[in-house]
Image (cartoon, rainbow, N blue to C red):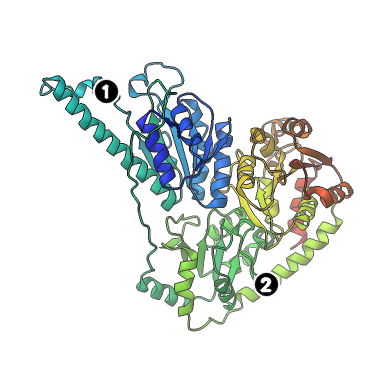
Amino acid sequence: MTYSNIPLAQTVVHLCKAKQVKHIIISPGSRNAPLIIGFTNDPYFKCYSIVDERCAAFFALGIAQQLSEPVAVVCTSGSALLNYYPAVSEAFYSGLPLVVVSADRPKHLIGIGDGQTINQKNVFENHILFSANLKLDLKDEKNIPASEDLPMIKSIEDKFERFLGLQKDIQTFNEESLNTAINMAIHKKGPVHINVPFDEPLYETVDTLLVTPEEIKVSYRSKPIDDYIIRECLEDWNAAKRKLILVGCNTPETIAQEWLDELYEDDSVMVMTETTSNLHHPGFFPNIDQIIAPLDEAEKAELQPDILLTFGGMIVSKKIKALLRRYQPKQHWHIDPERAYDTFFCLTRHIEATPDAFFRQFLPELTHYVKSTYREDWTIVKNKRNARQKEYIQEIPFTDLKVFDLLVKSLPPKTILQSSNSSTIRYLQLFNIKKSIAVYCNRGTSGIDGSTSTAIGCAAVSEKQTIFITGDLSFFYDSNALWNNYIPNNFRIILINNQGGGIFRILPGHKNTQEFDTYFETTHPLNARELCQMYNFTYQGVSNETDLKQALLRFYSKSKSPKLLEIFTPRLENDTILLNYFDFIK
């Protein structure tokens, strides 16, 4: 096998392999050549070449999201590293194990005006679990730093002894730093940064390993929740007549169905989910905005819970956040092994466990259910809203709302639905998604910058078909995502093109002015036809209901290339239709 002749590069590659970091996304460069040589010459690794570092990092997130294992991105020195930052912050807030490996210049070349050089140490310090700043190998005794050349070194033999000692110390430091970083990514679920300095020459190879790094294994065992916490929770739970469980972003099948069924048995418990919650039960409330948007202040007060129990990642609905901040529960419990955000400014308890582990300990201890009409009252509201929504959609013209209704109904079962941010994910919240469909969206930071890249990363490793629904600004912003040799033929993009940032027409503001159109909505005349031609996507564009229905009949079927369906909707009508929707369903 071929290896880089640089021991530090061998150490990085060896420990990534030992810790089963299998997927390596590489962006081209020269300073990272020792790493590229190591990763690409070992058949254990699945290596991908993606030029644009921002796209590469979001592509990695799509893989990590699907496989629930760490994925590495490897880049050269300089500004290349900074292009990872949007994905690093997304990984930090979404709890995804991203291992950033950056090549760097030696210390003596930093800060002197050398090309392609920035201050790379700790560059992600506000959005990272751990930064491993590795030390440069000492190539021979001539490389001992001047500060170490002490008077006690009086001979060549003394200097060589000192060299061997320093070399061993550096190797030990690097091994410990690498072990800590990758262990953190695996067990704490988040991004880590490994900065690796290399001196030239960079391309020399050997056919034997020069080092045998030691893997430091860490065992993270989940501890049972203390009995006193369970007792306190039971006492408060049994005294409350209105309990609201609100679920944010959640990986499919992480909570046993028996606990969901058990929660439904309690009439005082109302479970609100979102499209990204990936939890399903006929008695739950999956369309939050549909329920609460038409409420007046008195009705909102009636929804106010005694206990709010939350788990999962970020909440999409701004309306439920506003309601619970105004009508705060007496208690807010959040269940998560690592962190608890005080989203509603009333957090009272952080239960450090997985939701499934908590319910496994907690629910069997319940001896009775509290008599309450809490869920029954809101079920009546839910049924009324659903009926009114069907009426409304039947009578409206071809606009975004009608398009989403048709799309959701058309989605094949047992597929993966990836959504971009802004309007797309908010429209999807208004509809019930089939139980067998897994839904994902980059809601850690809710940016539009890498949605397409993440969806493609997901598609590249998933056995299921991946369908990506996106808006026009998000799609064109991340169009370099299509510069990718790993897109499977069954990948599908549905692009809803309303010629601008439609979400800004829904938000409060002065619409239909030159300033608004240019700087907020950002209107444009673009379409995706030429991009599809360049990147070998089968393209079809539609602009009415009849053509859309006809196109969807064939869109998901097998093909020799990935497909993109572009749906043109009227820019100036979508916001009115949506705002009138909430009045109609009241």
Q: Is residue 57 visible?
A: yes
Give me the disc on residue 379. 2
Q: Residues within 10 Å of mark 2 (few under 14, many from 20)?
A: some
Label 2, secondary structure: give it.
helix
At a point 87% along the width and 46% down the height, the residue shown is: 544
Q: Which residue is at the front of the view, 53 or 325?
A: 53
| Residue 299: image location, x then y, percent | 64, 67
Label 1, secondary structure: give it.
loop
Q: Residues within 10 Å of mark 1 (few under 14, many from 20)?
A: few
Q: Is residue 125 visible?
A: no
Q: Is residue 432 left or right of residue 2?
A: right
Q: Is 492 situated above or below 374?
A: above
Res 180 → quadrant: top left
Q: Is residue 558 left or right of residue 91?
A: right
Res 192 → quadrant: top left
Q: CA distance from mark 1 to mark 2?
A: 75 Å
Mark in the foreground, 1 or 2: 1
- Quarter of the image with the N terminus in it: top left
Specify the amino acid type for callout 2.
Thr
At a point 33% along the width and 48% down the height, the residue shown is: 216
Identify the residue under disc 1.
140
Q: Is 551 situated above or below 40?
A: below
Q: Which residue is at the front of the view, 55 or 271?
A: 55
